[in-house]
Amino acid sequence: MAGLPHFGHYRGPYGVVLDRLAVPERHVENVVNATTYDFRGFDTMGEEFILFSAVTGVVLLLRGGKPRRHREEIVRSDLVRVIGGVGPALVVVLGLWLVAFGFVTPGGGFQGGVALAGATTVLFVTVGYTAWSRFGDERILDPIESLGAGGYVVVGLAALASGLPFLANILGFGTPGSIRSGGSADLLNWAAGIEVAAANVILVAEFVEEYIAPKVRARR
Amino acid sequence: MSILPYAVAVWIFVVGIYGVVTSRNLIHLAVCLTVVQSSTYVLLLAIGYVRGAGPPIFDAVPVGTRTVDPVVQALSLTDIVVSVTVLALILALALDVHRHSGTIDPDEIAEMHG
């Protein structure tokens, strides 16, 4: 059917090659992450800037008319408040673990970054806008997002500066299965994690501000 | 039934397109577009699936073990990121449309601008 492989019988050349190369050559055990940040590292840089420019677009479209304000909100249920305090902490640990061990076990920068951003959203839902808005401040988030997007390029340029091809691994390969096994691909992994986390918090922040603003306006 | 996963991908695609075409609400339209894009995840993962193989992670299994294709999984990851960015941009545009014309019904917006 239209050149598609029979289901369950894929014999594509690239996957098999990457499976053979990832551990002996690149010293990483998670081949999906090795594909994302090492074999296809240049594409992922483009992908990061898709996210970066989309966030810029959303911020520009929704800009203006949203003065920061503190609403009185009291979540009355103690249970919800306790979950709201403990839940995000657990999700943050999960997110950091997903990024840190991205080259060893399932996970990676994108997955962990989304989990980290999700933690602040849980805070908004359970504790309320005032507690959340401290994390939704663009004066803090914008530099963090730029650090993630720019950091990826800086790691690439550092390889150029040391006489290697763009994005080549400059730190050398670690022991397979260890937390630093990715070498400088691990830095790219962290840059993507930071970028994705900050980008998603900014997106949520923009829409939450829109959601909060009309209510306050209507009350006047 | 080697055709079933591909049929599911086509079905999700068609259902999403139907939603986009008949949508009377820009938010609903954005969600339908996300459904259309979801069909590509199913298609990619169905292509890369290998019967009886494990995940492409050599933490506990030796190198050389048959795994499902890692390339399509990395592509799905890219796909999901693109999907999220498109959704965010469309929702922002929908808010902007609502701010300027007071409606998010595509037909009414078309009427207002002739």
Image: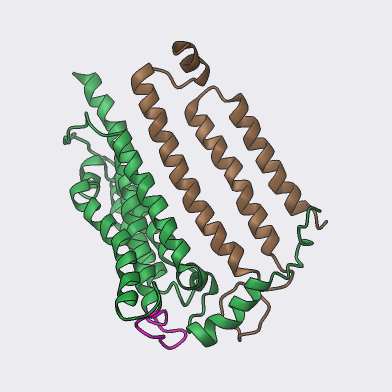
Q: Which image quadrant is residue B50 in?
A: bottom right
Q: State the image coordinates of residue A108 (x, y, percent, origin top left).
A: 44, 67
**In this rendering, would B65 be left or right of A195?**
right
Q: Main secondary structure of the magenta part?
A: loop
Q: Give the residue at x 41% y 51%.
A: A50
| Residue A113 belongs to magenta span | no
Q: Which residues are magenta?
A: A169-183
Q: Is residue A161 visible?
A: yes
Residue A210, compared with residue A150, is above or below; it is: above
What colour scheme was applied to this rendering of the protein?
Answer: by chain
Image chain in brown: B
For the N terminus of chain B, the image quarter is bottom right
Residue A136, compared with residue A183, is above or below; it is: above
* Closest to the observer, B30 or A85: B30
**In this rendering, would A15 be left or right of B51?**
left
Q: Give the residue at x 67% y 42%.
A: B12
| Residue A170 belongs to magenta span | yes
Image chain in green: A
**In this rendering, would A111 be left or right of A31?**
left
Q: How many marks?
A: 0
* Closest to the observer, B65 or A79: B65
